[in-house]
Image (cartoon, rainbow, N blue to C red):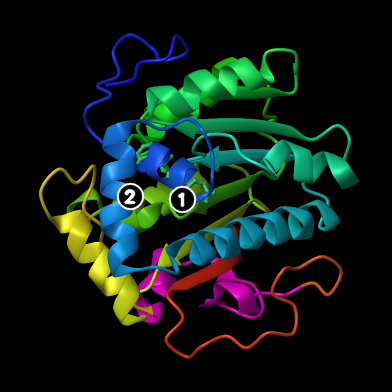
């Protein structure tokens, strides 16, 4: 088994991880044999998975731009993953040069790589933590001194909460994060769809099986709406990822049709 020198000591490279699988499907290089083998099994059941993940990154980019246009200049990126093209700080800085970003992930490779990449950037930080512990996460975020807790924050939970099971109480998790941040803060959620294409349902079945890094809990549109709880859901609500304010300028998909059984939803809310 390959073990490059950038791998943190505690990482078991023989077990696949969600962060490294995502990196593999997006064409990155921070993944191991175990990730590639599991990723290839998933791909056999859902050949268009990389397309969904690229759409997901486009959704992330559009949401960050939208938030910058609304005046947000600080972001909490929960389940940030291994840094890849179009990182939150890069997208935000294009319009908001002083934007600050705190990334949180429980994957040691993602956080180590994030720290290495962001080492010269005093406006960003990467925190190793489990997002299912909002108090611990918010305390760690405070310690970075990057987020001003008296001003609105964009809270990104993109392709994250389908790894939170019902017993993890994802609705309460969202409420806890938003309750710990000021009025005017924005939660963004991107999520795998339970009644989506056969491909995503097959892929989810692979994640139920042997050697899975983390089974998924896909949700319906109504369930994703429910994750926002009493927060205000901004226009156009929870919609298929490519349908959230597609931009004509540089969207890969601009103008192409979105299938009715498209496998992912997203939405943006606000704490009023
Ligand atoms: C599919 S990736 C999404 C990355 C990024 N948010 C995006 O949309 O491009 C999901 C990320 O969530 C992280 N993750 C899953 N469960 C987590 C948890 N309980 N605590 C922290 N991170 C978690 C994984 O390690 C992975 O990096």
Identify the image quadrant of residue 195: bottom left
Which quarter is ligand 1 in?
A: top left
- The answer to which of marks 2 and 1 sits earlier in the sequence is 1
Residues rendered magenta in the picture: 221-246
Determine which of the numbered discs, if any, sits on residue 152 in the image. Answer: none
Q: Residue 223: tell me if it is visible.
A: yes
Identify the image quadrant of residue 206: bottom left
- Ligand 1 lies under 8 Å from the Cβ of mark 1: no
Q: Is mark 2 on a helix, strand or loop?
A: helix
Give me the C-alpha separation between circle 2 and circle 1: 7 Å
Percent x, y of residue 218? 30, 67
- Residue found at x 69% / y 35%: 150
Q: Residue 194: tell me if it is visible.
A: no
Relative to 76, is 12 above or below? above
Q: Is mark 1 on a helix, strand or loop?
A: helix
Query: On the picture, is 253 further left or further right than 83?
Result: right
Q: Does the magenta stretch include residue 224?
A: yes
Q: Quadrant of the N terminus?
A: top left
Q: In which quarter of the image is the C terminus?
A: bottom right
Q: Confirm or deny contact between disc 2 and disc 1 (CB under 8 A).
A: yes
Percent x, y of residue 194? 30, 75
Q: Nearer the viewer, residue 92 or 151?
A: 92
Q: Mark 2 points at which residue?
A: 39
Q: Mark 1 points at which residue?
A: 25
- Residue found at x 86% / y 32%: 98
Relative to 240, is 139 above or below? above
- Residue found at x 63% / y 79%: 243
Query: On the picture, is 234 further left or further right than 239?
Result: right
- Residue found at x 34% / y 42%: 36
Q: Residues within 10 Å of mark 1 (few under 14, many from 20)?
A: many
């Amino acid at each position: 088994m390959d073990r490059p020198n950038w791998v943190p000591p505690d990482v078991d490279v023989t077990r696949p991880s969600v962060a490294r699988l995502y990196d593999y499907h997006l064409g990155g290089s921070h993944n191991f044999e175990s990730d590639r083998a599991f990723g290839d099994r998933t791909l056999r059941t859902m050949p268009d998975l990389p397309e969904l993940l690229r759409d997901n990154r486009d959704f992330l980019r559009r949401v960050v731009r939208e938030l910058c246009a609304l005046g947000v200049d600080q972001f909490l990126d929960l389940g940030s993953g291994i840094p890849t093209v179009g990182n939150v700080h890069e997208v935000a800085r294009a319009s908001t040069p002083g934007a600050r970003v705190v990334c949180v992930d429980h994957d040691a490779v993602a956080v180590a790589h994030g720290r290495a990449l962001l080492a010269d950037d005093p406006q960003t930080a990467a925190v190793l933590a489990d997002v299912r512990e909002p108090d611990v996460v918010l305390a760690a975020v405070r310690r970075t001194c990057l987020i001003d807790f008296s001003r609105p924050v964009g809270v990104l939970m993109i392709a994250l909460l389908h790894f939170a099971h019902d017993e993890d109480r994802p609705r309460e998790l969202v409420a806890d994060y938003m309750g710990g941040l000021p009025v005017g803060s924005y939660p963004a959620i991107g999520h795998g769809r339970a009644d989506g294409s056969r491909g995503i349902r097959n892929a989810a079945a692979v994640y139920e099986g042997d050697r899975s890094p983390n089974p998924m809990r896909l949700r319906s549109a109504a369930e994703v709406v429910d994750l926002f709880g009493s927060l205000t859901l901004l226009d156009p609500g929870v919609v298929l990822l490519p349908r959230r304010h597609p931009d004509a300028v540089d969207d890969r998909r601009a103008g192409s049709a979105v299938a009715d059984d498209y496998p992912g939803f997203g939405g943006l809310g606000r704490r009023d």
